[in-house]
Amino acid sequence: MAEKKKYAYDWPRPMVTVDAIVFNISGDSPRLLLIKRGNEPFKGKWAFPGGFVDMDEELEDAAARELAEETGLTGVKLTQLRAFGKCGRDPRGRNISVMFIGITKDSKIKGGDDAAEAKWFDINNLPPLAFDHNDVAMIAIKRLKTLM
């Protein structure tokens, strides 16, 4: 019989992830930062920079870490937007994601870690997004308009 590991439970547990929704306001029209996923699920599709929260990591720190690892962007003040947890949003299993929103004028980015590419997109011309990020983007864009 296999021995139970620390943090193992008799019932299923959801995954917890964070995503950074970052807008660039240095031009005529706001732009949204997206990464092209380098791994499955949705390999080659655009999504927000983000990933899994480490066991000893605060949510805000996880969002900033993922943003830096996948885009090279640091120093962006991130504020919690809201959590998304609709069943089926992630094909790997039950996932709850805490979304953070930030605004920057820094446009220097470079895809890294598990992001094949990082790119700014005009908020009026977004590509199809992975997971439920199309719905999340619409909510974030509405929030951006209240902040400007």
Image (spheres, rainbow, N blue to C red):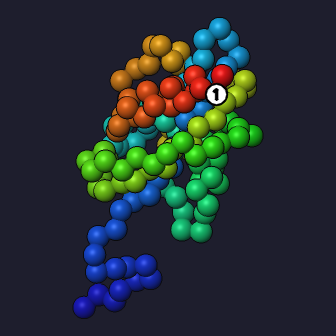
Q: Is residue 13 above or below residue 119?
A: below
Task: Residue 108 in the image: state x and y as whole percent.
Answer: 69, 25
Query: Quadrant location of residue 41?
Result: top left
Which sits in the foreground, 73 or 145?
145
Q: Quadrant of the C terminus?
A: top right
Q: Residue furthest top?
A: 28
Q: Quadrant of the N terminus?
A: bottom left
On screen, residue 134 versus residue 57, left or right, reads left
Residue type, label 1: Leu
On screen, residue 18 versus residue 132, left or right, reads right
On screen, residue 39 versus residue 50, left or right, reads left
Residue topped by disc 1: 147
Q: Is residue 6 at all visible to an observer of this figure?
A: yes
10 Å crowding of disc 1: few (<14), some (14-19), many (20+): few
Q: Is residue 74 at all visible to an observer of this figure?
A: no
- Residue at (45%, 13%) from the top-left corner? 125
- SS of the residue under disc 1: helix
Task: Residue 86 in the image: state x and y as whole percent.
Answer: 31, 47
Task: Residue 81 in the image: state x and y as whole percent.
Answer: 54, 42
- Residue at (28%, 75%) from the top-left corner? 11
Q: Is residue 88 above or below residue 54?
A: above
Task: Residue 43 in the image: state x and y as whole percent.
Answer: 36, 36
